[in-house]
């Protein structure tokens, strides 16, 4: 027999609780126990450790508020726990919220805003960021979506489709975003599409306000002045504008 549909209150109770627990997990483990970083470790002008701890406290207060909202919604929907698999549904949503926190924190705090990193004293902080992103972000999110489907057997394939949609959306959004040229760098490596002549490429570089430093087999090292616009190379035939030869160099726009 198919399970009765749950209310939005029970739905969002799990999301809020999971999101808040994700924040608590990071704050307690990384800020306090391991002391790998503080909320604003990489923000200039914050001040000494006393000020850093104050902002950590404000962060925890926000997580308390989010978790309190989740508990209130859970209390309002408490009668629904008499239904079959309601507990599994709630647990699945908590996992989704937990994963959503780590994905949000990784993208915004680590790579876009650059206010802190997972392990500041690591020689490769991006590695730790990626481990956190996949292990505590994507994995709980996908497991939560799968369990959500199992809480309603008639919707297993529909929720399996949601998993595929989430992954596809992540690729479609992150791909073009990661291909943006470096914002703070005045030099970059540009790779142009096959078939473009040297003259076309040189003209494209000149139109962008840059100059060619060297070239080799379709790969060009370009430098810009203050008014140069590296992204304009994409309009003139560039396939990649980065500050690295490596494939991971497409992430050069991020704070790695």
Image (spheres, rainbow, N blue to C red):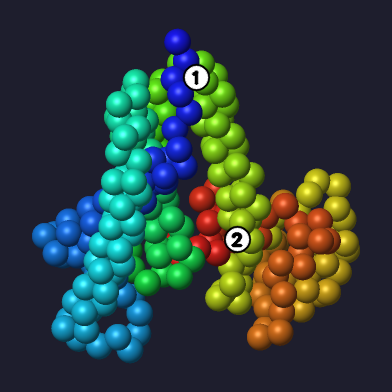
**Which of the image's four quarters has the C terminus?**
bottom left
Task: Examine the image and state in which quarter residue 144 appears.
Answer: top left
Residue at 56 percent of width and 24 percent of height:
158
Quarter of the view holding residue 89: top left
Using residue 49 as the reference point, say whether residue 153 is left or right of it: right
**How far across and down, in percent of the image, does residue 113 sit?**
45, 70
Q: Residue at x 40, y 65 (%)?
A: 109
Say few, some or many: other residues with alpha carbon within 10 Å of mark 1 (under 14 / 14 to 19 / 20 or more): some
Marks 2 and 1 sit apart, C-alpha to C-alpha, by 41 Å
Using the rendered view, name the quadrant where residue 86 is placed.
Answer: top left
Residue 147: x %, y % from top left: 38, 26
Which residue is the site of mark 2? 242
Say which label, 2 or 1, has the lower sequence index: 1
Q: Secondary structure at mark 1?
A: helix
In front of the other: 182 or 157: 157
Specify whether residue 18 is in view.
Answer: no
Label 2 neighbour load within 10 Å: few <14, some 14-19, many 20+: many
Q: Residue at x 39, y 58 (%)?
A: 105
Closer-to-camera residue (133/217): 133
In the rendered image, the residue lying farthest to the left is 33
**Secondary structure under badge 2?**
strand
Residue 203 vs residue 170, the one in the foreground: 170
Q: Position of residue 236 (x, y in %)?
A: 83, 61
| Residue at the farthest front position | 79
Q: What residue sits right under mark 1 in the picture?
A: 156
Q: In the image, is 190 to the left or to the right of 233?
A: left
Residue 190 in view here: yes
């Amino acid at each position: 027999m198919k399970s009765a549909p749950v209310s939005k209150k029970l739905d969002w109770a799990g999301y809020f609780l999971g999101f808040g627990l994700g924040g608590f997990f990071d704050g307690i483990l990384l800020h306090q126990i391991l002391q790998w970083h503080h909320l604003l470790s990489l923000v200039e002008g914050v001040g000494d450790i006393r000020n850093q701890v104050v902002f950590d406290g404000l962060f925890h207060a926000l997580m308390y508020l989010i978790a309190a909202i989740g508990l209130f919604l859970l209390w309002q929907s408490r009668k629904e726990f008499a239904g079959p698999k309601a507990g599994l549904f709630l647990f699945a949503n908590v996992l989704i919220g937990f994963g959503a926190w780590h994905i949000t924190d990784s993208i915004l705090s680590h790579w876009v805003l650059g206010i802190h990193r997972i392990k500041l004293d690591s020689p490769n902080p991006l590695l730790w960021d990626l481990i956190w992103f996949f292990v505590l972000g994507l994995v709980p999110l996908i497991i939560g979506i799968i369990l959500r489907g199992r809480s309603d057997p008639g919707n297993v394939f529909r929720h399996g489709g949601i998993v595929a949609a989430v992954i596809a959306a992540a690729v479609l959004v992150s791909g073009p975003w990661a291909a943006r040229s470096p914002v703070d760098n005045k030099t970059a490596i540009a790779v142009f599409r096959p078939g473009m002549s040297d003259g076309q490429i040189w003209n494209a570089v000149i139109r962008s306000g840059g100059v060619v430093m060297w070239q080799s087999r379709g790969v060009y090292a370009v430098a810009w002045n203050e008014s140069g616009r590296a992204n304009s190379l994409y309009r003139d035939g560039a396939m990649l504008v980065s500050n690295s030869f490596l494939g991971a160099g497409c992430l050069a726009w991020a704070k790695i």
